């Protein structure tokens, strides 16, 4: 019976809804990558963190003693901040490697951040971040002619 389609491998897929837009797919993928990275680091130690809010910026101080400046990474996305620190593996006597020291903190702030004006400084085991708030675009009245 050549003209009859049966449900199975040759049947067309039913339409269940619209595909998400490219922007939504990119956002989902970005969040998936972040969740995957944080899940991989689950059980790791966290460092002390102090966040102070001012009118125009947030000031963040993180205690990270024992890390090199090159071992620190700070990522800013909207109002979310990820601080990640990883010390390189060190060899112990007898050729055995010691487990590497990985620490991170992920947090969100109330206001969106201006990542182009953010600054970071690491001195004496303290990472200091200055995270300016994004200036809100105030509404503007247009004259209708």
Image (spheres, rainbow, N blue to C red):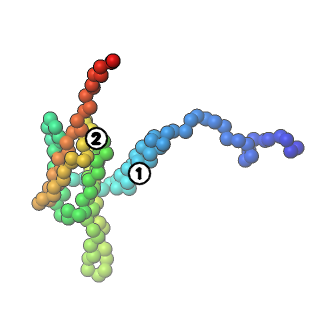
- Left or right relative to 48: residue 37: right
| 99, above or below 96, in the image | above
The reply to whether residue 122 is visible in this rendering is yes
Q: Quadrant of the C terminus?
A: top left
Percent x, y of residue 91: 27, 76
Q: Is residue 62 left or right of residue 98?
A: left
Q: How many marks?
A: 2
Q: Nearer the viewer, residue 142 or 14?
A: 142
Write down the residue under mark 1.
33
106 lies above or below 40: above
Neighbor class of circle 2 (other Cα within 10 Å; few <14, some 14-19, many 20+) is: some
**Residue 35 coordinates in the image, percent (x, y):** 39, 49
User: Residue at label 2?
Assistant: 79
How far apart in space, not on screen, are marks 1 and 2 (Cα)?
17 Å
Residue at horizontal 33%, vertical 18%? 144
Q: Residue furthest top?
A: 145
Of callouts 1 and 2, which one flags the residue occurring earlier in the amino acid sequence? 1
Front: mark 1 or 2: 2
At horizontal 86% and vertical 44% (from top left) the residue drawn is: 2
User: Could you say whether the residue bearing mark 1 is in a helix, strand or loop?
Assistant: helix
């Amino acid at each position: 019976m050549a003209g009859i389609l049966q449900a199975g491998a040759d049947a067309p897929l039913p339409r269940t809804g619209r595909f998400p837009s490219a922007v939504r797919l990119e956002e989902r993928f970005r969040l998936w990558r972040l969740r995957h990275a944080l899940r991989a680091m689950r059980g790791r130690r966290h460092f002390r963190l102090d966040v102070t809010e001012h009118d125009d910026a947030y000031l963040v101080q993180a205690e990270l003693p024992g890390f090199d400046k090159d071992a620190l990474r700070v990522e800013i996305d909207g109002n979310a901040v990820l601080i990640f620190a990883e010390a390189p593996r060190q060899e112990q006597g007898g050729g055995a490697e010691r487990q590497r020291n990985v620490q991170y903190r992920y947090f969100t702030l109330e206001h969106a951040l201006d990542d182009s004006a953010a600054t970071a400084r690491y001195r004496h085991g303290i990472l200091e971040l200055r995270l300016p708030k994004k200036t809100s675009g105030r509404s503007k009245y247009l004259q209708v002619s």
